[in-house]
Image (tube, helix red, strand yellow):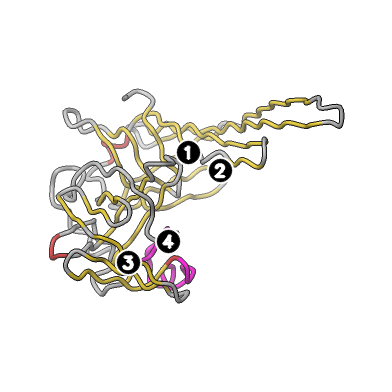
Amino acid sequence: MLLSTALAVGACSSSSGKDTDTSAAGLLPGSTAGGKPVGLFFFVSSSDFNNQRTYYFTPAGQVYVDPTDFSAAALAAVGPGQHGTYAVAGKQMTIKWANGTTTTGNYHADASGFSCEGSFMCVAPLSSARQLAGTFEGHNAAVTVDANSLAAFRTLTLKPDGTFIRDSYVASHSESHHADNSSFNTDAASTGAQQAGHWKLDGWYLTLTDARGTARGVAFRTDWDEKTDQTKIFRFNGTSYKNTGLR
């Protein structure tokens, strides 16, 4: 299940430029030291930017794809097609998936991550909440069936005082074809109610709390301004959020 060629950016050290100890949380930052990948890596396909995944490689030789959490119970619940064992021998990497399939590819590592039938960026936790303050837009991959598509967008403003505002926008496009070869296009959009609440960054984890409840998940950034250290893009609960004020 190694994926198609992608572009990796950034560095394997902490995204703040400082070493970060995450051993207490059990989740390790990505590293290629020691001759094999260990920790958390972010994948983006070069042929389809919407094809984005998270890989977690353990020191014991286990690999997990897109886990929803990193507790022992959550990792054990990852499906057989998305977890297995891995090994690197010379310039070759082999993954034996729990569903019985095996993938082998050429392995090449550098300071930013590694490539093996794809390219993976090693990521690390943010060092302070200040790095996340800003207004971000996140969206899912547009789902297309025949000529019909549906896409969801989210705007999330994380304020320095620990409060946030978010809203959502859904756009759809459909085409219908008739026996006389005529066609009819329909475009529709809807906006969800704006929500407000409080946010907190604690190591790897970002927590959003509002009247609807609490959303908590691992957050890491994949691009940032090296001069100001402000985040350009970060990943949270399966969605990439882009800073609308930084390009």
Is disc 1 in contact with disc 4, using a CB cutoff of under 8 Å? no
Q: Secondary structure at mark 4?
A: loop
Residue 211's mark? 2
Distance between the alpha carbons at the discs numbered 1 and 4: 26 Å
Confirm or deny contact between disc 3 and disc 4 (CB under 8 A).
no
Reading the image, the residue beneath label 4 is 67
Q: Quadrant of residue 59?
A: bottom left
Q: In 3D space, how far apart are the residues under numbered discs 3 and 2 (Cα atoms)?
A: 48 Å
Amino acid tagged 1? Gly
Whole-angstrom CA distance, mark 3 to mark 4, is 22 Å
**Residue identifier under label 1:** 197
Q: Quick one: label 3, few (<14), some, or many (20+) residues within 10 Å?
A: some
* x and y percentages locating residue 156 in the rendered image: 45, 33
Of labels 2 and 4, the one closer to you:
4
Residue that appears at 38% across and 45% down: 45
Marked residue nearer the N-terminal end (1 or 4): 4
**Quick one: label 4, few (<14), some, or many (20+) residues within 10 Å?**
many
Of the numbered discs 2 and 4, the one sitting upstream in the chain is: 4
Which stretch is magenta?
63-81
Give the spatial CA distance, label 2 vs label 4: 27 Å
Q: Which residue is mark 3?
A: 104
Horizontal and vertical percent for residue 100? Answer: 45, 76
Q: Name the amino acid type tagged 2.
A: Ala
